[in-house]
Amino acid sequence: MTPKPTALFRKKFAGGAGSPYDWRMNASTPLFSAVAINDTHLRFGGHDFGAARAKLAAVVQRIADGRDGPPPQVLIQLGDLVEEPRRDHFEQAARFFEPLKSTRILHVPGNHDIGPDPDGAAAHPWLEALGGALNNACVLNGVMFITLYNARADATDETETVARNEWLRDLLQRYRATPKVIACHVPLVALRDPQQIEKSFGFLSWRSLDYRHTLRRMIESHRDSVIAVLSAHLHLSGHALVNGVHHLVASGPFSWPGDHLRLDFYRDRVVARMIPLEPFIDSNDIAPYPLRNSVHDRHGIEFTDAKHPAFEHYIAGNPDEREVILPR
Ligand SMILES: [Fe+2]
């Protein structure tokens, strides 16, 4: 008999003293840490839809409290921060990160953040509220963090796409030896069997709409310096190693199991971990699995694929996707 998903999930993935997710069990302390949070889909002005605001607040507090490791030097917000791309909503959303006082926040634009772009101004609220640029890079503790706009650019905007690729090509060549973490909203590779994820996700963008794979190939040509590519958008958690590049996607707090991603940088390795929200949040709005993934469970079908024969692992990833050691 298959164990009940919630019980199985709690046993395998939940943190706490003595579990693999108790970072204090590690022999050494990381040199520094980064976290990534994605697909929070915040709405304002009324009911806390799907407890999205409560979930993000709980994740940020968990990070600030150091439950899974020391406070991170950098937080990458991987996109779909809000449901509607309004400047006042971005400004309210940005306040959720205030408990992380000494953490540098990097923002990646998602498709919900930018919206359709008939007049070329769709990115203005995001740019005005969060600052920076659609594509950006900074070096922290010797690691370059590159944030890229691919949520709509590859599908609809040839000019944006060409400009981004030229900028990135130049950047990668100038900083060949610098270790890099690259972040973009839409994954560049398939995280599940393509035929299955096209159905369970329900949108063609289960992988980048850059059908020539220009961006992915450019990154692969610098695989020796790329620690990982972090993406979002899918509302499930997984890891894929494709042509020598590690790709990681977390479900995000909004969707069961509410994962955010933590990267602990050691001298000789980077440990990537999915940290689930459940069962740490105490809210009547949060129901246990299989409810409230809101994406892959909306069809009434328990999707699986060859590598994920159980539905909870199809959504949450296998244990070897939930903790990944990345060689530098
Ligand atoms: Fe998205």
Image (cartoon, grey):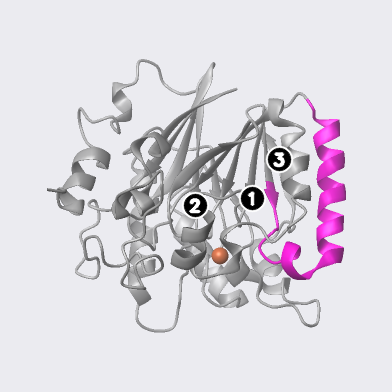
In the image, taking residue 272 as reference, residue 169 lies left or right, namely right
Q: Ligand 1 appears in which quadrant?
A: bottom right
In the image, taking residue 231 as reference, residue 68 lies left or right, namely left
Three-letter amino acid code at the position of disc 3: Cys
Residue 126 lies in what quarter of the image? bottom right
Q: Which residue is mark 2?
A: 193
Q: Does the beta carbon at disc 3 come under 8 Å from ligand 1? A: no
Q: Which residue is mark 1?
A: 188
Residue 250 vertical placement versus 80 (above, below): above
Q: Nearer the viewer, mark 3 or mark 2?
A: 2
**Residue drawn at point x = 49 percent, y = 62 percent:** 95
Badge count? 3
**Residue drawn at point x = 31 percent, y = 62 percent:** 302
Q: Residues within 10 Å of mark 3 (few under 14, many from 20)?
A: few
Q: Can you give x and y, in whole percent of width and height, for residue 213 in the image? A: 74, 50
- In space, the residues marked 3 and 2 are separated at their CA atoms by 34 Å
Dot 3 or dot 2, earlier in sequence: 3
Q: Nearer the viewer, mark 3 or mark 1?
A: 1
Q: Can you give x and y, in whole percent of width and height, for residue 134 in the image? A: 73, 59
- In space, the residues marked 3 and 1 are separated at their CA atoms by 21 Å
- In space, the residues marked 2 and 1 are separated at their CA atoms by 14 Å
Visible residue check, residue 234: no
Dot 2 or dot 1, earlier in sequence: 1
Three-letter amino acid code at the position of disc 2: Asp
Residue 103, label in figure: none
Q: Nearer the viewer, mark 2 or mark 1?
A: 2
What span is colored magenta in the figure?
Answer: 147-176
Dot 3 or dot 1, earlier in sequence: 3
